[in-house]
């Protein structure tokens, strides 16, 4: 058996998310179908680093699978891209040590949330950004975002129905930049709760628009109340940009 790492890019608009679903088409399903067709192995399972939601995109999703195929590791990307739909692409494939696990070996992830800030919505960017038609104060948003940095219990930033037991996470960096008509939020940390980045994005727009007072995030971290935060921003603005791993796990087996 060999373990192969994939780096994937996809437009999540037409999918139920990364994870395989019983009654909807997922990115994982499409990749597994392509792999089974390519290798002839009927039970290949692809494990992803992040279970991105319906409508969420990726430029740097990571995944791994085990195979007995002798296809050269770097050729999997080329072969799979001939079998996958146009909205899913493998940007890199490589053989890694069996200790590599796409989800559990990840030490950091970075997400981008993209706003389209204009009076009227965009036709071209409707699936890649969230439309905001009211003015946003970028300085206020940046000051508010700084309170996220560090290790905190982010329980109020988890969507209802989340079953994770440990809600403590570390945020390493947050930035907000504006290149009209776009406003870009980037958040990097060691892990994220279900819908956490979308709740951060919705809260920051609430502060930037004046609908929420500054200090909302600090109050929510102290109170653990979801009511102190803003709405959950829509999925289409969110993109998983990269996943970081310890370098030794990404090396091919000796």
Image: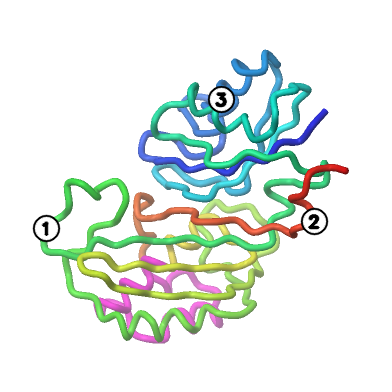
Q: Mark 3 or 2 closer to N-term?
A: 3
Residue visible at 60% across and 56% down? Answer: 243
Please tell me in which quadrant of the rendered image residue 224 appears. bottom right
Label 3 CA crowd tier, 10 Å (few <14, some 14–19, many 20+): some
User: Which residue is under mark 2?
Assistant: 248
For the residues labelled 3 and 2, the Cα–Cα distance comes to: 27 Å
User: In the image, which residues are magenta?
Assistant: 201-230
Residue at (69%, 15%) from the top-left corner?
A: 42
> Which residue carries the number 1 mark?
120
- Callout 2 crowding tier (Cα within 10 Å): few <14, some 14–19, many ≥20: few
Q: Is residue 254 left or right of residue 45?
A: right
Q: At 39% from the left edge and 43% from the top edge, which residue is drawn?
A: 55
Q: Is residue 55 left or right of residue 26?
A: left
Q: CA distance from mark 3 to mark 1?
A: 41 Å
Q: Position of residue 83 (x, y in %)?
A: 49, 21
- Give the SS element for disc 1: loop
User: 219 or 34, which is in the foreground?
Assistant: 34
Task: Give the structural element (helix, strand or loop) at label 2.
Answer: helix
- Seen at 46% across and 27% down, the residue is 25
Which secondary structure is most common in the magenta stretch? helix
Classify 159 as above or below 227: above
Quadrant of residue 247 in the image?
A: bottom right
Q: Nearer the viewer, mark 3 or mark 1?
A: 3
| Circle nearer the N terminus (3, 1) | 3
Mark 3 lies on residue:
79
Report the mark closest to the observer, 1 or 2: 2
- Tell me the quarter of the image containing the C terminus: top right
């Amino acid at each position: 058996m060999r373990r192969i790492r994939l780096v994937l890019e996809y437009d999540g608009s037409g999918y139920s998310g990364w994870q395989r679903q019983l009654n909807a088409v997922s990115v994982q399903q499409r990749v597994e179908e392509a792999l089974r067709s390519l290798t002839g192995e009927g039970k290949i399972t692809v494990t992803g680093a992040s279970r991105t939601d319906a409508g969420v995109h990726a430029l740097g999703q990571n995944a791994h699978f085990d195979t007995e195929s002798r296809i050269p590791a770097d050729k999997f990307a080329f072969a799979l891209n001939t079998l996958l739909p146009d909205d899913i692409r493998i940007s890199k494939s490589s053989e890694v040590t069996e200790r590599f696990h796409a989800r559990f070996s990840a030490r950091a992830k970075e997400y981008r949330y993209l706003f389209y800030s204009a009076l009227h919505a965009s036709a071209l960017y409707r699936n890649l950004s969230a439309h905001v038609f009211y003015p946003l104060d970028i300085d206020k948003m940046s000051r508010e975002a700084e309170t996220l940095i560090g290790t905190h219990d982010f329980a109020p930033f988890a969507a209802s129905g989340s079953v994770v037991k440990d809600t403590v996470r570390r945020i390493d960096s947050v930035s907000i930049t504006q290149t009209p008509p776009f406003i870009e939020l980037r958040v990097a940390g060691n892990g994220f709760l279900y819908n956490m980045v979308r709740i951060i994005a919705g809260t920051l727009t609430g502060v930037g628009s004046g609908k929420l007072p500054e200090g909302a995030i600090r109050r929510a971290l102290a109170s653990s109340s979801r009511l102190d935060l803003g709405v959950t921003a829509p999925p289409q603005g969110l993109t998983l940009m990269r996943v970081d791993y310890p370098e030794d796990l990404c090396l091919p087996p000796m």
